[in-house]
Image: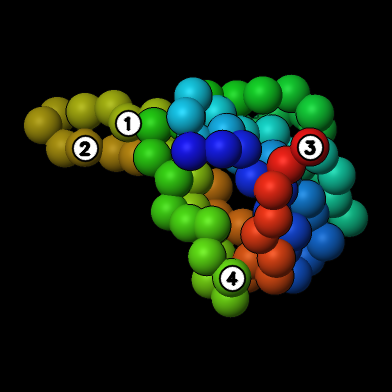
């Protein structure tokens, strides 16, 4: 799969590289979450829900098992408004 650019309703723009399971937020109207890290920096994900126009994108950064229970740490964006080719 080729990298794509994603715009969300909140004004954030992402670049997603599904072939290498990585994503980076390019810009946003609010500060990035600590889990996302600074704008422009690639970060690997475990699982990505989307991007699908009209639906929030869910990003699972990591999964851990504690006392036999699985816990996913992730981020959910606002609804995706546009998906297009990157670069």
The quadrant in which residue 41 appears is top right
Q: Earlier in the sequence, mark 2 or mark 1?
A: 1
User: Distance between the Cα atoms at labels 2 and 3?
Assistant: 37 Å
Q: Nearer the viewer, residue 57 or 64?
A: 57
Q: Is residue 73 visible?
A: no
Q: Is residue 71 visible?
A: yes
**Residue at image x 64%, y 66%?**
80
Residue annotated with mark 4: 53
User: Distance between the Cα atoms at labels 2 and 1?
Assistant: 7 Å
- Frontmost of labels 4 and 3 is 3
User: Distance between the Cα atoms at labels 4 and 2?
Assistant: 29 Å
Q: Quadrant of the C terminus?
A: top right
Residue annotated with mark 1: 63
User: Distance between the Cα atoms at labels 3 and 1?
Assistant: 31 Å
Q: In the figure, is residue 21 to the left or right of 53?
A: left
- Frontmost of labels 4 and 1 is 4
**Residue at image x 32%, y 31%?**
63
- Above or below, 60 against 79 in this view is above
Say which element carries label 1.
Answer: strand
The reply to whether dot 2 and dot 1 touch (C-beta < 8 Å) is yes
User: Distance between the Cα atoms at labels 4 and 1?
Assistant: 26 Å
Q: Earlier in the sequence, mark 2 or mark 3?
A: 2
Residue annotated with mark 3: 87
Indicate which disc residue 46 carries.
none
Q: Earlier in the sequence, mark 4 or mark 2?
A: 4
Q: Residues within 10 Å of mark 1 (few under 14, many from 20)?
A: some
Residue 10 placed where, x, y %? 78, 65
**Residue at image x 70%, y 29%?**
37
- Above or below, 8 against 27 in this view is below
Residue annotated with mark 2: 70
């Amino acid at each position: 799969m080729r990298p794509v650019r994603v715009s969300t309703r909140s004004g954030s723009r992402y670049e997603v590289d599904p072939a290498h399971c990585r994503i980076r937020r390019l810009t946003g109207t609010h500060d990035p979450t600590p889990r996302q890290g600074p704008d422009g920096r690639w970060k690997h994900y475990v699982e990505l829900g989307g991007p699908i126009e009209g639906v929030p994108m869910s990003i699972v950064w990591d999964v851990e098992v504690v006392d036999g229970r699985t816990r996913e740490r992730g981020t959910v964006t606002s609804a995706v408004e546009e998906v297009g080719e990157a670069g």
